[in-house]
């Protein structure tokens, strides 16, 4: 309770209450503050719309809301600059964590898939370099390996889960079998664009 008082409670002007409070408490305790995980039973309703595509629209809006969690980056970096009592080691580790979580993990799949094409558009002369010939082949291998591992994963899934209902249409059964490869599509869409929109709106 004392930590709550010292941190001046929550910031009513920011909708992301738990993240903002953590960094306020982190600063007021000069870096001597961590979150402790409590594993408890939890349930939550999945997003649902009035139609199939409406559910995807609702999911997109929910992911945009989650993307606002990136507000912790400017808040924490501001406190790192202001509070000289926070150990440099804590500042460095948290900055690297921000880079990994909000930059690398969000963009890595997109950059692996389209990175070379984007660079070629920005700088056409890149095609004349020696590694321009080998890089597409390397990227192809990197993208092919996960697809190969989806085959045994799909077979294992069919063995351990309940069989698909007999009355399912063919297209639904097909999508169920392609659930693994569709993860890559999800990484390029719902795991990227909602967070990009949230960060752009925050700017």
Image (spheres, grey):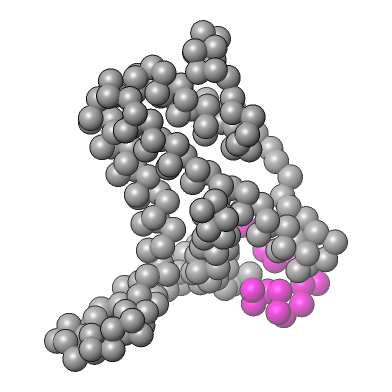
Q: Which quadrant of the structure image shows residue 144?
A: bottom left
Residue 121 vertical placement versus 192 (above, below): below
Q: Which quadrant of the structure image shows residue 61?
A: bottom right
State the residue in front, 48 or 156: 48
Residue at horizontal 26%, vertical 37%? 92
Report whether 76 appears left or right of 161.
Answer: left
Disc tally is: 0
Can residue 165 be found in the magenta stretch?
Answer: yes
Which residue, as the protein is rendered here, is positioned at the far top?
A: 2
Report whether 170 appears left or right of 85.
Answer: right
Which residue, as the protein is rendered here, is positioned at the far front?
A: 82
Residue at horizontal 52%, vertical 27%? 21
* Residue 28 in view in this figure: yes
Can residue 169 be found in the magenta stretch?
Answer: yes
Quadrant of the snapshot with the N terminus: top right
Report whether 155 appears left or right of 144.
Answer: right
Which residue, as the protein is rendered here, is positioned at the far left?
A: 130
State the residue in front, 66 or 141: 66
- Tell me residue 56's x, y (percent): 70, 63
Q: Which quadrant of the structure image shows residue 136?
A: bottom left
* Residue 144 in view in this figure: no
Q: Which residues are magenta?
A: 159-175
Residue 83 vertical placement versus 149 (above, below): above
Residue at horizontal 69%, vertical 37%? 43
Residue 160 vertical placement versus 150 (above, below): above
Residue at horizontal 62%, vertical 49%? 65
Report whether 145 appears left or right of 50.
Answer: left
- Tell me residue 188's x, y (percent): 50, 69
- Tell me residue 72's x, y (percent): 47, 39
Residue 96 vertical placement versus 117 (above, below): above
Which residue, as the protein is rendered here, is positioned at the far bottom?
A: 128
């Amino acid at each position: 309770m004392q930590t709550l008082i010292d941190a001046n409670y929550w910031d009513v002007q920011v909708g992301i209450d738990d993240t903002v409070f953590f960094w306020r408490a982190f600063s007021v305790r000069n870096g001597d503050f961590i979150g402790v995980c409590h594993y408890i039973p939890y349930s939550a309703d999945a997003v649902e719309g009035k139609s199939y595509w409406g559910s995807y629209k609702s999911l997109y809006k929910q992911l945009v809301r989650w993307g606002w969690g990136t507000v912790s980056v400017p808040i924490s970096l501001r406190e790192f600059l202001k509070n000289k009592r926070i150990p440099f080691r804590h500042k460095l580790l948290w900055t690297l964590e921000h880079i990994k979580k909000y930059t690398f993990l969000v963009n890595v799949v997109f950059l692996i898939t389209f990175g070379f094409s984007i660079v070629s558009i920005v700088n056409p002369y890149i095609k004349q370099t020696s590694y321009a010939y080998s890089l597409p082949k390397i990227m192809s291998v990197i993208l092919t390996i996960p697809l190969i591992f989806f085959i045994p994963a799909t077979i294992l899934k069919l063995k351990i889960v309940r069989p698909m209902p007999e009355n399912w249409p063919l297209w639904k059964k097909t999508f169920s079998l392609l659930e693994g490869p569709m993860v890559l599509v999800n990484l390029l869409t719902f795991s990227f664009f909602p967070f990009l929109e949230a960060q752009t709106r925050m700017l």
